[in-house]
Each structure stands twice: as structure tokens, then as C-alpha cells.
Amino acid sequence: MQFNLERPDYTYFLRGADGTGALVNDRRLGDSFVVAPDTLVEAWPVRDALAMTPADLDPLLALAPELVVLGTGAAQRFPPAAVMAACLQRGIGIEVMANAAAARTYSVLAGEGRRVVAGFILAA
């Protein structure tokens, strides 16, 4: 069986994530971060989904997404309603899931050419 390595046609591709780290391109990240197909924002200061405020979404919303994928660590944890409303009031979808699922979802959407931005919360 032949396998071909397919490289996406965008700058930052997410190979995977869990509760403590992620692999973006060939770099292992250990701090929370934001990724879009053409942007990587390292050292996103969010450490806990339950303690998020709407302002924590500013780096994601500044990238003009149509959809935000929020990876909340090893397990799915919903942020406060005000955080969800910050996206929905702007007509931007938001999906919340554990990091592993968020990484898969982000990769599929980015591969489809969607304007997706993902924020990943990693345990310090």
C-alpha cells in the first residue's frame, strides 16, 4: 500500500493536540495558542475555559473567522455564556470541544478552505 504525504496549501497546519500540548507544523507547543490557516498566535493567556471572559476571544475575533473552534483541554468544558454570546452576537459560530476533537475539526474545516480560527487551552 502506498501512502502519500499531503501538505496543505496554507501556512499553519495542526497535526494534533491533547490537554498538555499540540503539534503545529513541526513544532510542539506547550502553552495555550490560537491558530488559523495563515496565523499562529502563541502564548494565548487563557488557562481555564470556565474563567474565560469575552475579551479572551479578541485575538481570535481579530482574524475575522466565520467559525471559532475552542479546544478546552483534555475534556470539554463550556466557557461562560457571555463568551459564547460574544461570537454569536457577531454572527460567528462557536464550537467547544476537547482539544483532540477540536484539532480534528479545525483540520477538516481549514482543509475545506473555511475561515476557521481555533483557540487551544493547554494545561500549564
Image (tube, rainbow, N blue to C red):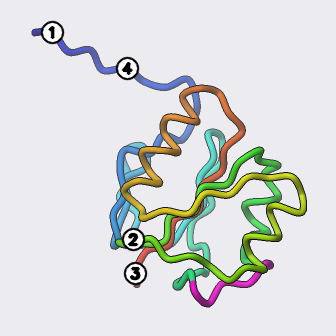
The type of residue carrying mark 2 is Gly
Kindly check if marks 2 and 3 are in contact, taking CB atoms under 8 A apart as contact: no
Amino acid type at mark 4: Glu
- Across and down, in percent, residue 59 comes to 75, 65
Viewer-closest of 25 and 51: 51
Along the line of sight, which residue is nearer the eye, 24 or 109?
Answer: 109
**Residue at numbered disc 4:** 6
Residue at 53% x, 85% y: name it: 48
Residue occupying the far front of the picture: 81
Q: To which residue does mark 1 refer?
A: 2
Q: CA distance from mark 2 to mark 3?
A: 8 Å
Label ID, residue 30 = 2
| Mark toward the start of the polypeptide (2 vs 1) | 1
Instruction: In the rendered view, tell whether residue 78 sits above or below residue 112.
Output: below
Lower position in the chain sequence, tag 1 or tag 3: 1
> How many residues crowd around disc 2 within 10 Å: few (fewer than 14), some, or many (20 or more)?
some
Magenta-colored span: 50-55
Comparing labels 2 and 3, the label whose residue is closer to the camera: 3
**Residue at x-position 58% and y-position 30%:** 10
Q: Position of residue 80 (x, y in %)?
A: 68, 83
- Looking at the rendered image, the quarter that the N terminus falls into is top left
Q: Residue at x 54, y 28 (%)?
A: 111
